[in-house]
Image (spheres, rainbow, N blue to C red):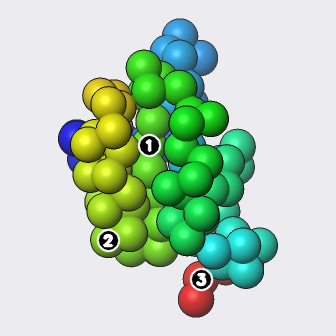
């Protein structure tokens, strides 16, 4: 697993010449409704074990949560299940709001 800072992810998403990653948001639905990174796919940690086979294990995937802890654990789980291109968003959406999008609601 690799790690990425919010500003690095923003630069990646803004780079039209680079394939965008899957943004896998593992928070709960109420958190996702409050705020999320545009284009993120919600797959809560609470249901991940039964739904991760719907994901492409070869695709670069940035795992996102509130502060980066749940996403780290989800990425480790996915690694143990054959996923290789996993990236944890350090600081989660909280860091995104502070470093990239100060208009994003926080909680």
Which mark is first along the chain, 3 or 2? 2
Q: Which residue is mark 3?
A: 106
Q: Is residue 74 left or right of residue 84?
A: right
- Image position of 14 with respect to 32: above or below: above
The reply to whether dot 2 and dot 1 touch (C-beta < 8 Å) is no
Residue at the spot 49% in from the left edge and 15% down from the top edge = 18
- Please identify the residue farthest to the bottom as the structure is shown: 107
Name the one closer to the observer, 4 or 76: 76
From the top left corner, tell me how far across and down residue 44 is, in percent. 60, 64
Question: CA gap, disc 2 to disc 1?
Answer: 13 Å
Q: Which residue is mark 1?
A: 62
- Please identify the residue farthest to the right as the structure is shown: 33
From the top left corner, tell me how far across and down residue 15 is, in percent. 52, 22
Residue depth check, mark 3 versus mark 1: number of the one nearer the observer: 1
Crowd tier of the residue under label 2, counting other residues whose Cα lies within 10 Å: few below 14, some 14–19, many 20 or above: some
Question: CA gap, disc 2 to disc 3?
Answer: 17 Å
Disc number placed over residue 90 in the picture, else none: none
Mark 3: secondary structure: loop
Q: Is residue 28 left or right of residue 95?
A: right
From the top left corner, tell me how far across and down residue 7 is, in percent. 39, 49
Mark 2: secondary structure: helix
Mark 1: secondary structure: strand
Q: Is residue 91 left or right of residue 76?
A: right
Q: Can residue 97 be seen here?
A: no
The reply to whether dot 2 and dot 3 touch (C-beta < 8 Å) is no
């Amino acid at each position: 697993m690799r790690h990425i800072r919010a500003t690095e992810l923003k630069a990646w998403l803004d780079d039209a010449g680079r394939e965008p990653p899957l943004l896998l948001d593992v928070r709960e639905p109420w958190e996702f409704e409050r705020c999320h990174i545009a284009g993120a796919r919600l797959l809560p940690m609470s249901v991940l074990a039964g739904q991760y086979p719907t994901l492409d294990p070869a695709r670069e995937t940035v795992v996102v949560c509130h502060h980066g802890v749940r996403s780290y654990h989800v990425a480790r789980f996915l690694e143990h299940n054959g996923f290789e291109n996993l990236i944890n968003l350090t600081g989660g959406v909280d860091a995104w709001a502070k470093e990239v999008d100060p208009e994003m609601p926080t909680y």
